[in-house]
């Protein structure tokens, strides 16, 4: 593939803060290597609660949507996203909540409409690589996360087809679609560390049942974050209303241990128009251009 076109990596996320908890270090690394990085966030996270007691005020509840957008913009800067695109939907809320049926919610939006919005972004920014969520998300059945998977797969397949969404810009085919993989090993390592250090583990018996007994999606790609292991933490902290800096769940272990555990991100190649990897890759742009190296 002749590569005169600049490299671009697009990630699709459901809510503000998902971009911080998933793949932040990977994005930072690609951004630093000169790849253009674009974040699509599908909803405004309006249904989120305020989980940090220090900022849990009635005024903040009133303007939560506005605050979450500001937090997202800050996190995107910390991570190194070159562009943030809001897809413009309302947070659908947790499974079986009233918010699921809100007419503006992402879950209620016609699939074609949401796909078209994403296709429009893809055709404009022309990413070779798209990263999204898998269908199976470790038992996490948030309707917006499932929807992110659906629209990403459809948009990846439709974007290069001139007969589909003709009003959404000139066709462009991305080369690879990846799923970000929840790395079970990282959470097992974390739990073991809590036990070893005599700190109360944030993982309950039920969590172990739901998460740990579940099969992990086999990864095809491992991105080492050397030099960018602190990005996740900093990006999480940008979401002041969502992430309590005193939370054991997020930051219960000493910083250097957290960074050692979260020193890599895992991905599974879900769709590809280029050659499939024969062994585990260490670069999302493998096979796209031989000269890309992070
Ligand atoms: Zn989310």
Image (cartoon, helix red, strand yellow):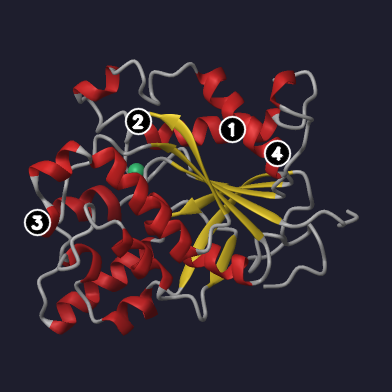
Q: Are marks 2 and 3 in contact (CB under 8 Å)?
A: no
Q: Residues within 10 Å of mark 2 (few under 14, many from 20)?
A: many
Q: Residue at x 81, y 69 (%)?
A: 291
Up-down: is 92 above or below 33? above
Q: Are marks 4 and 3 in contact (CB under 8 Å)?
A: no
Classify the position of ligand 1 by quadrant: top left, top right, bottom left or bottom right.
top left
Q: Residue at x 68, y 65 (%)?
A: 279
Q: Position of residue 238 (x, y in %)?
A: 32, 61
Q: Nearer the viewer, residue 277 or 94?
A: 94
Judging by the rendered image, the residue that carries numbered circle 2 is 143
Disc 1 versus disc 3: nearer the observer: 3
Q: Secondary structure at mark 1?
A: helix
Closer to the N terminus: mark 4 or mark 3? 3
Q: Residue at x 51, y 55 (%)?
A: 218
Q: Disc 1 to disc 2, how far (Cα)?
A: 18 Å
Q: Residues within 10 Å of mark 4 (few under 14, many from 20)?
A: some
Q: Quadrant of residue 78?
A: bottom left
Q: Disc 2 to disc 3, how far (Cα)?
A: 27 Å
Up-down: is 193 above or below 90? below
Q: Residues within 10 Å of mark 1 (few under 14, many from 20)?
A: many
Q: Residue at x 35, y 69 (%)?
A: 234
Judging by the rendered image, the residue that carries numbered circle 3 is 53
Closer to the N terminus: mark 4 or mark 1? 1
């Amino acid at each position: 593939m002749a590569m005169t076109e600049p490299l671009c990596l697009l990630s699709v996320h459901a809510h503000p803060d998902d971009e911080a908890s998933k793949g932040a270090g990977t994005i930072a690394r690609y951004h630093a290597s000169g790849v253009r990085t674009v974040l699509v966030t599908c909803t405004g996270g309006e249904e989120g609660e305020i989980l940090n007691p220090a900022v849990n005020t009635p005024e903040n509840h009133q303007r939560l949507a506005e605050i979450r957008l500001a937090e997202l913009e800050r996190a995107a800067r910390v991570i190194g996203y070159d562009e943030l695109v809001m897809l413009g939907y309302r947070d659908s809320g947790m499974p079986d909540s009233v918010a699921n049926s809100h007419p503006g919610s992402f879950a209620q939006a016609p699939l074609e409409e949401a796909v078209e919005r994403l296709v429009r972004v893809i055709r404009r920014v022309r990413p070779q690589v798209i990263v999204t969520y898998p269908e199976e998300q470790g038992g996490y059945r948030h309707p917006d996360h499932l929807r992110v998977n659906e629209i990403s797969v459809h948009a990846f397949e439709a974007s290069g087809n001139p007969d589909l969404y003709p009003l959404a810009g000139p066709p462009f085919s991305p080369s690879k679609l990846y799923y970000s993989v929840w790395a079970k090993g990282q959470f097992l390592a974390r739990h073991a560390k809590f036990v070893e250090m005599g700190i109360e583990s944030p993982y309950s018996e039920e969590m172990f049942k739901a998460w740990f007994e579940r099969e992990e999606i086999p990864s095809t790609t491992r991105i080492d974050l050397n030099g960018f292991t602190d990005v996740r933490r900093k990006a999480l902290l940008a979401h002041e209303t969502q992430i309590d800096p005193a939370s054991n769940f997020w930051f219960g272990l000493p910083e250097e241990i957290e960074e050692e555990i979260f020193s890599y991100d895992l991905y599974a190649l879900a769709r590809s128009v280029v050659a499939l990897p024969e062994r585990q890759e260490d670069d999302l742009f493998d096979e796209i251009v031989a000269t890309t190296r992070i």
